[in-house]
Amino acid sequence: MKIPSHRSRFVRRLAGLSAGLLVVAAGCATEEPSAGRLSCEGSSAGVTTAPAPDPSPPSAAEAVRRPPGAPFAVQGGPSAVLASTDGGGLDAYRVTPQGHLLRSRVGATGTDDQWRLPLGEPFRPDAAWVTVTAPRGADAPLVVASHRQDGERQSRWTLVSPPGERLLSCVWRPYDRLEHVEFAHSGDAVVATRTTRKPRLNGSSDVADRFVEIHSTRTGSLLGRFRSTDFAQDGALVYGRSGTTVIAHAVSDGRRVWGTDTEEELGDPRRKGADPVHLAGERVLVQARDARTTIALDSRSGRQVWRAVLPGRMEAVHPLGGERVLVQYRGGFAFAGPEGIEHTVTVPPPGNSGRQRLEHLAVIDGSATAAVVDGHDDSAPVLTVFSDRGEPARRPLRIPLPTAHVQAVLTRSAVYVLPWVPDGRQATLRAYDLAGGVPLWSADVPDRLTITDSAGPAPSLHAFRGGLYGVDYASGWILPSS
């Protein structure tokens, strides 16, 4: 698996993918799958019975509207940060430099360590790329992943219960350096997207075929295989596409559950990453090769729910709960419900041909609200805040920014923005009123954290009642309310 640098645009996407099924995107591999590639110890019994997480965006925290107190540094590290169930702060799960998983309660006065689980040398952040995810929420097991490219290349996953008990540990030996790997939050399957090559009949060149493989963590055996360039998964089904058809296979045994002919060419099956399958809550979305026609299917039955034409190519889909999704396309965003597209918000694409950055998605006063950087004009970048109903739906708020590279997080009445600064320069956090975009305050903070260019909301800033928590792969700080 190709591991990006700590501050690359793919860091946050990798962290999210590590929470799902073990996925391998391999190139030039021709050998048959070997059971020895996957070995596991322990059991995932009981994991799959955990309730599915609510796909709705989280509710926004209360804002710090007055100038905050002085920030203080705390230990950073690969982490998952969740709102505590009692509403009093945040629960942070971090991997320490020694390779220990540490759970702490985060509050305005600091962090209170609750338990520590040694994971071993392979999980040291300086030895591998390590991620921590909570794919099914705070009451279900966490997934700690370690991907190592130097020396003996391998990927490891440890499933950990909320009280800190190791449930299942797996090691995957990759096919080659181009692999892309994920582990199932259910703990019972591994999915691998592989490339095989064979010579053309005239001998002029090789033809690449791409497949999705489903492996068992119980036996290491191959459960199923089907042709697809890409896939999405929800822990129960794996979704792919081939030609004009979208297909779903069961994680438990690899069998085909349904297939739906969309009557639209969905992309070239020989081209890696072409026209991916998007999964958001109860919906599977695909886009035709013409980059305009978008089809939404019911994830359990494969039934077509709606079909629409978008102004641009679909880049990501974000669940809003139930049958509602936010579709991110090149040039804007579209809110969609049971009947299709409800309304769109235009956000000009970045001038560097990159994608719009959805900085944060949260529920404010019952409305799904998003903060997006419009960086198409480097000399005048803007943070656009819009929602699915109310005044921000009719008239999005636009806040001028000092730079297009920022981290932003929404609260109930304010948005915090941390602009990028060069190494060695002072980082300054700024707060703006959501009612009109006027500045509320600014405060110097110890570190700028990681500024990413991910497809979806993946902040290293976390608002809570009483302050703001910033945590990165190597550092962290707390900014308490005054």
Image: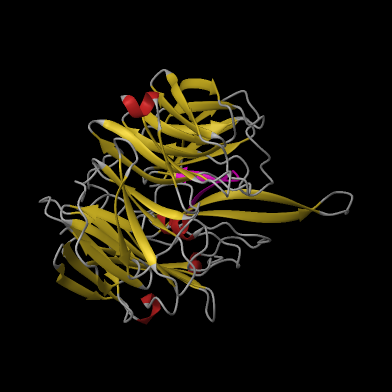
Q: Position of residue 148 (x, y in %)?
A: 49, 73
Q: Position of residue 198 (x, y in %)?
A: 75, 54
Q: Is residue 352 visible?
A: yes
Tell me the quarter of the image containing the C terminus.
bottom left
Query: Main SS type for the magenta part?
Result: strand
- The residue positioned 65% from the left and 61% from the top of the image is 29
- The residue positioned 52% from the left and 79% from the top of the image is 152
In the visual, does 111 lie left or right of 227? left
Q: Is residue 231 above or below residue 474?
A: above
Q: Is residue 422 above or below residue 377?
A: below
Q: Residue furthest top?
A: 339
Q: Position of residue 14 (x, y in %)?
A: 46, 58
Q: Nearer the viewer, residue 117 or 242?
A: 117
Q: Residues in magenta?
A: 221-232
- The residue positioned 52% from the left and 21% from the top of the image is 307
In magenta stretch: residue 3: no
